[in-house]
Amino acid sequence: MKFLKVGRVAIITRGRYAGKKVGHFEPVVFLSTQLIFALQVVIIQPLDSGSKSHSFPHALVAGIERYPSQITRRMSKARQAKRSKVKPFIKIVNYNHLMPVSLPDVVRWE
């Protein structure tokens, strides 16, 4: 599909990574001065015609499964380190389960 390009931001609408809310749905990641919100993923590689293992049109996407928790100065260094961890994910998603958002291309592949 023309509009599902490399670097495009999308929302997963079905499955394990859909429907999760993190905090108050705040902007949490900054990539090239654009905001990416909690439920969004970035398309890494779109495959319009499918592949041998996945015969349907799909895309390889990357996103963040678990965001860092809020930390304060009173917390110990160990607790701050534990709460600062980010858990990313990479997944193959069917085009039917992706909804592109109206943000411009975020990641520039050069």
Image (spheres, helix red, strand yellow):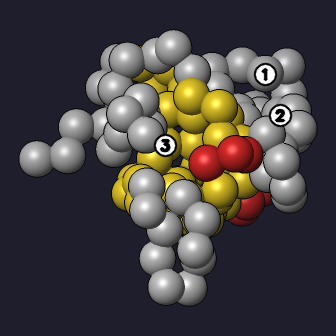
Query: Where is mark 3, residue-wise?
Result: 42
- Whole-Å distance between the Cαs marked 3 and 2? 17 Å
Q: On screen, 67 above or below 39?
A: below
Q: Position of residue 23 (x, y in %)?
A: 86, 28
Q: Earlier in the sequence, mark 3 or mark 1?
A: 1
* Image point (49%, 85%), residue name: 52
Quadrant where the N terminus sits is top left
Query: Where is mark 1, residue-wise?
Result: 25
- Whole-Å distance between the Cαs marked 3 and 1? 17 Å
- Whole-Å distance between the Cαs marked 2 and 1? 6 Å
Q: In this orientation, which residue lies closer to the viewer: 94 or 103?
A: 94
Q: Amino acid at mark 2?
A: Val
Q: Residues within 10 Å of mark 2 (few under 14, many from 20)?
A: some
| Mark sitting on residue 22 | 2
User: Mark 3–mark 2 contact, CB under 8 Å?
Assistant: no
Q: Amino acid at mark 1?
A: Phe
Q: Earlier in the sequence, mark 3 or mark 2?
A: 2
> Marks 3 and 1: which is nearer the front?
3
Q: Position of residue 50 (x, y in %)?
A: 48, 68
* Image point (57%, 21%), residue name: 101
